Amino acid sequence: MPKSHGQPKPIEAHMESSKSEEREETDSPPVPQENEHEPEAAADAEILQSDDWWNPSAPAPDWSEPVTEAPAEDVIPAKETGTADVYFCGHTSLFPLNRALQAIAKEKLTGLLRSSWDEEPIDLFARDGQIVLVTTRDPDLYCSETPAALTDIDSVVVDRARNQQREKGTPFFLTLAREESIAREQAVELMQHYGQELFSELWTAPRAWIMFEKNADLLTDVAEMPGEANVNDWALETLRLVPDPDQPANFDPTSIPAYTKDGFEQVQNLKLISEEARFASQFNGARSVQQIAKNLRLDLKSARQLLFRFLALMLACQHGGQTPTTRIFSASWPVQPARPVVLPRCLRGAVAHEEENSGRRYRRHTC
């Protein structure tokens, strides 16, 4: 008799099937509860997406069109407090020291010219293009000796002023004047002398880094100090304090000094001493350094010292000689034709100026 489809299974078979299901549950890892709700979340997302089907999609960016940026005034942040306003900077091998002084005078700058070299940095304060003073935080480098004007002052007072210079950089002569230990006029003279003597060290420094910071607030501590208006005369006085510039390896006594365009005009306004005026009158575009020294009865060392001053001030350059276009100092500058001018009486004589320019030679005599 055939079995009906609705007949229940035997109890043994039911027990075996339940045991196999338990084994499968123990073998398979448990399913997290959050995974059980994933289908529902996906369904809800589909419903939301179907509700927003009518919203327009964001237009894709057109890479062919340039992206517009905010105006520059909105992007550039405001200048932070304490940020240095550097007007110029560079090494003296590429940016001569005299060019920095001329920029201060021409642009009537106010601020600090800092020169960093092997020793403690040297600071030159300028106000409206005038040189106020030169100082450093090393009082021994500034003035290693005891001037005669300070012999009657208590050594404790002088040492305290020196320590203040070491901390703030203020010349200890100025501190003594404010304490009424010395007269103000006497302090000004001492600061001018030792400041120029300190600055003269930079003319022979092999490679110094100079930087000018425009900041009028830097001069508040030296507001009572007068300024030197004639920068060229001031620089020439510092060059006279250079004892003996080292002779460069490429120094050529047979090379010929000649005026630059600006130098030929500026030399007439300088306060030259007798030996400088006689040396300057020998520049005729043909005489060598050796010949000039012979004419003036100078030894070659003295002639080289005088020439160093004109080269450092960029009043003259060195060319010719055994080696073409010989330049013995980094401050030399190319010769340019100058306009005829009238020399002062101290420079009367034959003065010539030569230049090689586009295959033509320019020569000028002024009597």
Image (cartoon, helix red, strand yellow):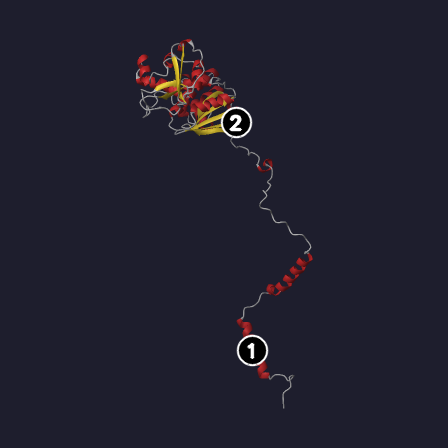
Write down the region rendered in magenta.
215-219
Secondary element under disc 2, as helix, strand or loop, is loop
The image's mark for residue 7 is none
Where residue 125 sits: x, y (%)? 48, 23
Examine the structure image and report whether residue 75 is included in the region drawn in magenta.
no
Q: Nearer the viewer, residue 127 or 337?
A: 337
Looking at the image, do the residues carrying marks 2 and 1 touch, with CB atoms under 8 Å apart? Answer: no
Q: What is the crowding at mark 2: few (fewer than 14 residues within 10 Å), some, or many (at least 20)?
A: some
Where residue 180 sits: x, y (%)? 48, 18
Farthest-out residue, front: 359
Where residue 77 sits: x, y (%)? 57, 36
Above or below — where is 217 with respect to 258?
A: below
Cα separation between marks 2 and 1: 93 Å
Q: Earlier in the sequence, mark 2 or mark 1?
A: 1
Where residue 194 sits: x, y (%)? 42, 20
Q: Nearer the viewer, residue 102 or 161?
A: 102
Farthest-out residue, bottom: 1
Q: Amino acid at mark 2?
A: Asn
Q: Is residue 240 visible?
A: no
Considering the image in quadrants, where does the C terminus appear?
top left
The residue shown at (56%, 78%) is 19
Above or below — where is 54 with respect to 186?
A: below
Q: How many marks?
A: 2
Secondary element under disc 1, as helix, strand or loop, is helix
Q: What is the crowding at mark 1: few (fewer than 14 residues within 10 Å), some, or many (at least 20)?
A: few
Q: Amino acid at mark 1?
A: Lys
Q: Is residue 98 left or right of residue 328?
A: right
Q: Is residue 177 visible?
A: yes
Q: Which residue is mark 2?
A: 215
| Main secondary-structure element of the magenta-colored stretch | helix
Residue 15's image quarter? Answer: bottom right
The image's mark for residue 19 is 1
